[in-house]
Amino acid sequence: MSGLLALLDDVAAIAKVAATSVDDIAAAAGKAGTKTAGVLIDDAAVTPRYLQGFAPARELPVVWRIARGSVFNKLVILLPVAMLLAAFAPWMITPLLMMGGCYLCFEGAEKIFHAILPHADARVEADMSVRDPGRLEEEKVRGAIKTDFILSAEIMTIALSAIEVPNVWMQAATLAVVGLMVTVAVYGAVGLIVKMDDVGLYMARNAYTGAVRGFGHGLVKFMPVLLKLLTIVGTAAMLWVGGSIILHGFHTFHIAEPGHTIEVMAQAAGAAVPQAAGAVTWVVTAVLDGVFGLLLGLVLIPVATRVVGPVWAKLRGRKSSGH
């Protein structure tokens, strides 16, 4: 009997440790997840564009296919790579973060440049040339999953740099929780966004009261505004996150400027409004980080379009011809 009680006591102790570990993983995942907020906003803003042109009945199945691809990207490809980096080459995490930051700055600046000076978009023209709905869906899903891979790599790297847990197993578990949590949040929001106009249309046509029908009409009219707002917020988030990642990388490599100047300006602005010094300092820092990200992105546009893009296209062409 005493042996059984001792065994039960040991089981209870193990369960307590496991519960504590789960709590620690959840807390670490929550903390790491907040660090990726800017990229999440952009991810949620980017994905709905891949659903344009589909019948309403295909929207949620396409979202589900992209979400499954996103989980594969995060858990099967990126998680093992991240853990190998953390174990054997932690010094590579900051440079990789900075590369991702450069990509975010380029994407954000390119969107602004395109809005100010509209130009032909090869991807849109390619979509318009596709007449087969099945082929169009396959191409759009593949394109969305490729874009998700880049954003997921940035999310996982940011999360990895923010995770503070005692061992590699908890680190891996935390990163997996972050990956799943982020995927559910992003694609749950995307699914809700793309179906809201259908919900509004149903209410406008079938509601019993005028007030609800009016709300449905308003919802249908509001959705294009919401999508535009998401695009603006997503672009601003890209520039803010990308710029702050680069500046933090500079600090890691002991490069003081322009981060020091931004810090001095933000602190001066906060001191000018002592009643809300913390909030003002944060806002000014975020805005200046975004401005830095925009300037860097504008510099990167010709580099990406005239150097990196053609070289990558040529390499892909050689690979395809080799097969």
Image (cartoon, grey):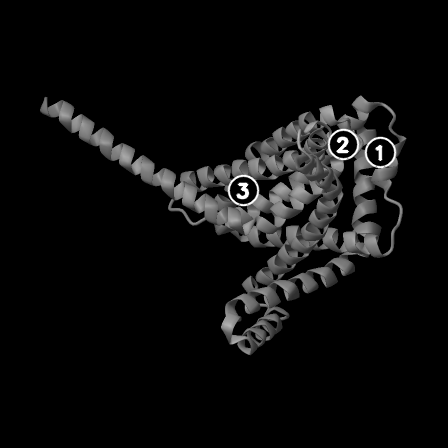
> In the displayed structure, does residue 40 sit left or right of residue 119?
left
Q: Is residue 89 above or below residue 183?
A: below
User: Of discs 2 and 3, which sits in the foreground?
Assistant: 2
Q: Amino acid at mark 2?
A: Lys
Secondary structure at numbered mark 1: helix
User: Which of the numbered marks, if any, corresponds to residue 140?
Assistant: 2
Q: CA distance from mark 2 to mark 1?
A: 8 Å
Q: Amino acid at mark 1?
A: Asp
Give the image location of residue 303, x and y in percent.
79, 55
User: Farthest residue in the left direction?
Assistant: 2
Q: Earlier in the sequence, mark 3 or mark 1?
A: 3
Q: Earlier in the sequence, mark 2 or mark 3?
A: 3
Q: CA distance from mark 3 to mark 1?
A: 34 Å
User: Is the Cβ of the residue at disc 2 closer than 8 Å to that at disc 1?
Assistant: yes
Q: Tag 3: Cα neighbours inside 10 Å, few (<14), some, or many (≥20)?
A: many
Q: Tag 2: Cα neighbours inside 10 Å, few (<14), some, or many (≥20)?
A: many
User: Which of the numbered marks, if any, corresponds to residue 127?
Assistant: 1
According to the picture, the residue beneath numbered tag 3 turns out to be: 82
